[in-house]
Amino acid sequence: MPELLFEIGCEEMPARFVPPAIEQMVSLARAELAGQGLGFAEIKAHGTPRRLALVVTGLDQGQADREEVALGPPVKAAYDAEGQPTKAALGFARGQGVAVEALETIDTDKGPRVGVRKQISGRPAGEVLAELLPRLVTKLPFPKSMRWGSGSFRFARPIHWFVALLDGQVIPFELAGIKSGDQTRGHRFMAPGWIKLSGPADYLERLGQASVMADRDQRRRATAEQVAKAAAASGGRLVPDEPLIDEVTDLVELPVACLGSFDREFLEVPRAVIISAMREHQRYFALEDDQGNLRPNFIAVNNTQPRDLAVVTQGHERVLRARLADARFFLTEDSKTPLIDFLEDLKEVTFHSRLGTSFEKVQLVKDLALFIAERLGHLDQAQVARAAELAKCDLVTEMVGEFPSLQGVVGRDYALRSGEDPAVAEAIAEHYRPTAAGGELPSGDLGAVVGLADRLDSICGFLGVGMAPTGAADPYGLRRAAIAVIRIITEKGYNLSLDELIDRAVAGRQPWIEAAAQKGRKPSPADLEQVARQAHRFFQNRFQGLLTEQGVPTDVAQAVLEAGFDDLVAAKARALALAEVKDSPDFAPLAAGMKRVMNILRKEASQVPADPPRPELLQSGAEAELYQAFQDLAGEAERRIAEGDYLGFLRGMSGLKGPIDKFFDDVMVMVDDDQLRNNRLALLNHIAGLFASVAQFTHLQLV
């Protein structure tokens, strides 16, 4: 069966572009081939910084013949009373290129219509692919694309060649001024000439002979093996860094590792700075000894096999020596001043033009952190205050100016060098955690509390001056910050009131919020309560998304959060409990009954009395039975809720299922008698009140 080889040759793409592009090549090819009715046995894709390739085996020879039905106007509009074709029928036939006599009546969901059946002959695979392959290129998505020359076509990098072969024959097409052919290029430096290809069978082998490992999996294995071999030769071990292995894999077409060294005196520079200087700037791997101490060595992965690897290694060493010398200079300069002395410099740093300086933010974060610590009750207030004051001081150091990704890490090191409490120093680094979705949380409470205060101030501040995220745009990471707040509180089990924290954070930002309102910012939330409500909704949306990511059905998350989530820990426990029992045979009927109860109460909200039901007004046996059943269960149910045993509560209340069903079968709630009607509404409200503390059942989707 036919085999397809398709390669796009281009300038070197950024490493992060390559793996997604390989995946997209496969998924787009599958969709395009299926859309054209071409079957296949297998699709594979390969990629390097200079090329993306697609290999399709077991391809159909061509499309199958098919019948197409074109529908025209309704029959009653296509023929007049005498059965003669109208202008509508004549126009449709003419448009389809057939005689009006060829039209036939076809039954459809909207009644009989005239139509025509056409037998379409399938096209050969090569003819289809000549149109499909250029379309696939234009559909490949990249984080950023570019134009070149005078054309308007966009791609990740300028394209230099296309290889398009079906069973060894060129599939002719032209795109962006480049004609398809049967020739590729080898390694840019080691085998830059043209290489004639015959098809998929020898593609990888021919490129391998030209110093190109086109198979990404093979190239990654080779990269990892060479790095491991160099690490073993050093007498140390590799500092684990799988993401860097991936990145280097997509920076080269032929990985060649070398082991370099640097002066031991540079080891006085903080470990994180050394690793960052190697990793972030040069893509070098760090090495350590058996005790976990950094060794004065590194591993670089080259994209060529040089004649003299020692010369190349010396070049890497010179580059790294300069980077480490800079870092040592920054350390020397920064160390002349205790970390706390940098606090004053934050007065000259603008946090945001609408939200003041970083110094002002530090003061607000400190006040809020002390408030949180007071609520938790077990933290040393002096430590909290000191950690908050020092948390942002490293932002104005020379070291962080050069290595911005190390903020917090540098602060921790400088705090220890300044003689600060080790717990305070650790909090400086940890208050940034989690740094990504699902990332590691602060290990200690001190860093967690400062991190909570920092994020709450930012969220309420930006919302308060009208800078809420819009659509996919979230330049200040407020959504990520809200998720971090929720995760820290719920996963650490902090007994905190979210509403109280929001109110406190909004109050701290009152001058900036009022100033924004006076300047006519849109929206202009001069009312602090309005800002607090906006922040509450913001957290609700993030919490709902987080719960669904953790396996809670969307309707359950909505039902629970609508019942309140001031206590985030309890709200999460309620959601997990309801998700577990919602569809169980014992609970589902009760949930349906409670949904009916709450719908009635919502509809008749203006008539529902606040007082509990009066037993003496219970007339029917069904309503008395429901009242008694609830009374029998209520005490235990309230105890379970108070203890946070929501699963036990929900399972225990399943006994109300029968009495509720009987009540609705035998009792009419909305009777004319005001006293009876109000008492029955009070009974339902009395029952619903307990359930409503767990979830608003009206939001549940029940099968």
Image (cartoon, grey):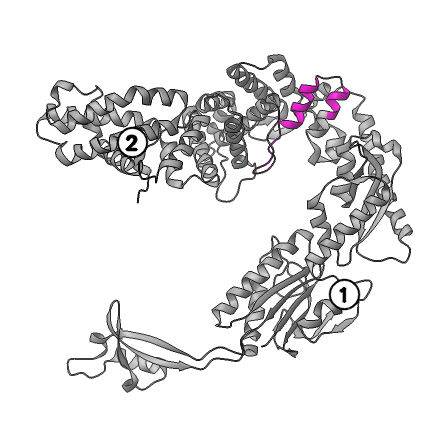
At label 2, the amino acid type is Ser
Residue identifier under label 2? 654
In the image, taking residue 34 as reference, residue 625 lies left or right, namely left
Q: 378 above or below 601?
A: above
Residue identifier under label 1? 208
Magenta highlight range: 413-440
Name the spot of residue 280 as percent of width and height, x first: 74, 42
Quadrant of residue 70 within the rendered picture: bottom left
Query: Residue visible at 81% across and 48% down?
Result: 229
Q: Earlier in the sequence, mark 2 or mark 1?
A: 1
Where's the C terminus, which quadrant? top left
**Secondary structure found at label 1:** helix
Task: For the residues labelled 2 and 1, say whether their Cβ atoms are less than 8 Å apart.
Answer: no
Q: Is residue 281 magenta?
A: no
Q: 80 above or below 471?
A: below
Quadrant of residue 239 within the rendered picture: top right
In the image, taking residue 261 as reference, residue 386 lies left or right, namely left
Viewer-side label of 2, 1: 2
